[in-house]
């Protein structure tokens, strides 16, 4: 059951990320907007992150058959997704994400070299949670400004992804519980909520115009 | 409080004015565009120069003064701009 859900989640994540990434890229090519450029990087990263984990599970299931997926593959996929979540949050103008002190900046990267891949996964999941929660709150605030109904769905989607990420991280404490399964179901719901308003944007008659770059 | 407009939004406003809100068939003067787009002369001059060089606006010499009209490429750009503004709105973002 967990394996099936994991595959569904990663496949949906890959497709939703790819779909929104392509739309953002078309938008960037047509308008030259830096916001759409950041969104395309964000969603292509999310898509690649989900794909890496999905490919890891597929390789384990059909080729390696060792009984459990290599931990570093999962960590790599989650790390790539975190980059995507960072760019979503960055699009909302994160101004104080990096410490101003050069000392803290230089030691800030140390944990990446000092901890194991399992601890790195904890780290990426917790950073993802913060970025997703930030994105969800900012999107909800923008809804309060312009009353665009699509923003509610995206905000709920990001909030569900954040909750799923939190439960996924918390399930390390209770490894045999239902928490991880619940986190995957919540994340699938979040991805669907994220795609609903985007799927309604009419993209007919939009074409690439090389002259506008 | 005044709403912050991105560079892209200002371009959208200028193109929309030259498409929907022209003074006459020859096009819009710089003064008219300044009033409609609500930006300074130096800034609009730079933007108009870029838009003409990108082929989004056509510069027309009318009775000794420059006027600006939207081109076909400009119309397509504006259509894309509106669609992707709605796309970005879903994420609570401005393009």
Image (cartoon, coloured by chain):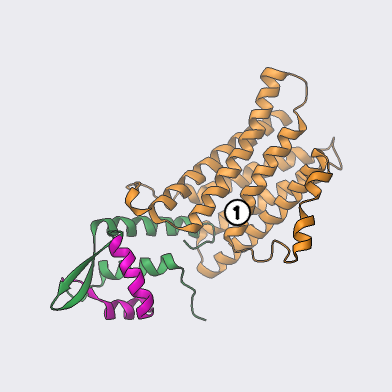
**Who's the residue at 26% across and 69% down the image?**
B18
Residue under pointer 1: A87
Start-end of magenta stretch: B25-53
Q: The residue marked by circle 1 belongs to what chain?
A: A
**Who's the residue at 61% across and 63% down the image?**
A138
Q: Is residue A1 visible?
A: no
Q: Which residue is at the far left?
A: B63
Left or right of B20? Residue A172 is right
Colour seen for chain B: green
Q: Is residue A134 visible?
A: yes
Q: Give the percent coordinates (x, y) of residue A151.
A: 54, 58
Q: Give the percent coordinates (x, y) of residue B50.
A: 33, 65
Nearest the eye: A180 or A83: A83
In the rendered image of this protein, does residue A83 appear above or below residue A15?
Answer: below
**Who's the residue at 33% across and 74% down the image?**
B45
Q: Quadrant of residue A171?
A: top right
Nearest the eye: B65 or A21: B65
Colour seen for chain A: orange
């Amino acid at each position: 059951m967990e394996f099936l859900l994991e595959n569904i989640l990663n496949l949906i994540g890959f497709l939703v990320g790819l779909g929104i990434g392509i739309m953002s890229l078309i938008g960037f090519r047509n308008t030259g907007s830096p916001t759409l450029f950041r969104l395309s990087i964000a969603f292509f990263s999310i898509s690649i992150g989900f794909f890496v984990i999905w490919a890891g599970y597929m390789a384990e299931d059909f080729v390696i058959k060792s009984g459990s997926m290599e931990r570093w593959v999962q960590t790599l996929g989650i790390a790539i997704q975190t980059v995507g979540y960072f760019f979503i949050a960055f699009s909302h103008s994160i101004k104080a994400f990096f410490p101003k002190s050069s000392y803290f900046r230089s030691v800030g990267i140390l944990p990446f070299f000092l901890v194991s891949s399992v601890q790195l996964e904890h780290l990426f999941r917790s950073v993802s949670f913060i970025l997703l929660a930030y994105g969800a709150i900012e999107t909800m605030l923008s809804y309060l400004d312009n009353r665009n109904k699509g923003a509610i769905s995206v905000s709920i989607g990001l909030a569900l992804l954040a909750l799923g990420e939190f439960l996924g991280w918390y399930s390390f404490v209770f490894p045999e519980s239902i928490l991880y399964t619940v986190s995957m179901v919540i994340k699938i719901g979040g991805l669907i909520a994220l795609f609903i308003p985007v799927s309604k944007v009419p993209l007919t008659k939009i074409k690439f115009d090389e002259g506008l770059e | 409080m005044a709403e912050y407009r991105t560079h892209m939004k200002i371009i959208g406003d200028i193109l929309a004015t030259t498409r929907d809100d022209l003074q006459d068939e020859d096009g819009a003067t710089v003064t008219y565009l300044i009033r409609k787009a609500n930006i300074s002369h130096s800034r609009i001059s730079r933007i108009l120069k870029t838009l003409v060089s990108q082929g989004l606006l056509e510069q027309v010499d009318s009775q000794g003064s420059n006027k600006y009209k939207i081109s076909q490429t400009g119309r397509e750009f504006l259509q894309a701009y509106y669609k992707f503004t709605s796309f970005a709105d879903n994420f609570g973002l401005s393009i």
